[in-house]
Image (cartoon, grey):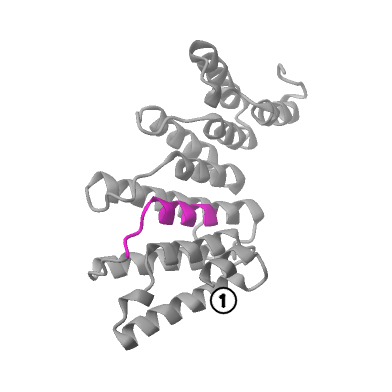
Amino acid sequence: MLGAWAKSGVRGAPDRAEAILHKMDQLSKENSDDEVAPDNISFNTVLHAWARSDSKWAAKRAQSILRHMDKLHENGNKLIQPDTVTYSTCINAWARSASSRTFLKQKDSISPAKNAESILRRMEYVFSNGLNHRAKPNILAYNAVLNAWSKSGDENAAKQACSILESMEINPDIQPDVYSFTSTINACAKAKDAQMAEAILEKMENLYKATGNLSVKPNIRSYTSVSIHTQHIFGANVHP
């Protein structure tokens, strides 16, 4: 039932899925029955529902669930420990929020991209310090944060994206791919830093020529991101 609601995509599905999750927790406590107690899969299923939702509250609900999981684990619940899927799904919720502009803006609100990056930094911290061996950051998490920055419109988006890309390049476990580079190009191009955008594209071309690695081969979006924005700035196309 939980999975069916989470995958349905119908309006109100995340709320229904979360209500079932709470019901499972309530029943397990009332009857001292671990068989119906929600576990990581249960929580991650609900997180996935929120990450797919168009609700303006989706990313905030996902982050609230992540915090609840953290608290349960810290209080000794052995069934619950946020893992790579948990963190990555929450990051995706914020990235989707940045992309779709569904984020409910408030005077004191933090941007979706900043929230996404803060979750990534939390992943890095708990994993590298041995606090959670199940929370190893993967390239999907990094790329989701880069995507969030590229769609954010934040004045520091290009700087933040370049910083993340550089950290990936020196990390043997997380090497950037075409999506990493292209999102960073997009962030730089939107910031009207055509020089940096072209430099990253050139780096991709050289890296592909040197290694033959298809995962870094520039695609049409890589070139288009540079071409459209540099044309706007300089009134001329870059090489195709």
Residue at the spot x=52%, y=34% of the render? 180
Q: Is residue 121 left or right of residue 2?
A: left
Crowding around mark 1 (Cα neighbors within 10 Å: few <14, some 14 to 19, many 20+) is some
Q: What quarter of the picture does the C terminus occupy?
A: top right
Verify whether residue 88 appears in magenta. Answer: yes
Q: Look at the image and tell me in which quarter the N terminus lies.
A: bottom right
Q: Is residue 175 magenta?
A: no
Residue at x 52%, y 52% (from the top left corner)? 92
Q: Report x, y in % for residue 43.
A: 43, 66
Q: Is residue 209 left or right of residue 126?
A: right
Residue at point 50%, 40% (across, down): 143
- Residue 86 in which image quadrant: bottom left
Magenta segment, prevailing SS (helix, strand or loop): helix
Q: Which residue was labeled with disc 1? A: 16
Residue 32, placed above or below residue 183: below
Residue 150 visible in the displayed image: yes
Query: 163 above or below 89?
Result: above
The correct choice, above or below, for 63 with respect to 175 in the image is: below
Instruction: Look at label 1 and name its amino acid.
Output: Arg
- Residue 173 picture location, percent across and down: 36, 32
Query: Who is closer to the viewer here, 15 or 116?
Result: 15
- Local SS, label 1: helix
The residue at the point 58 percent across, 42 percent down is 150
Q: Position of residue 197 (x, y in %)?
A: 59, 27
* Left-right relation of 78 to 207: left
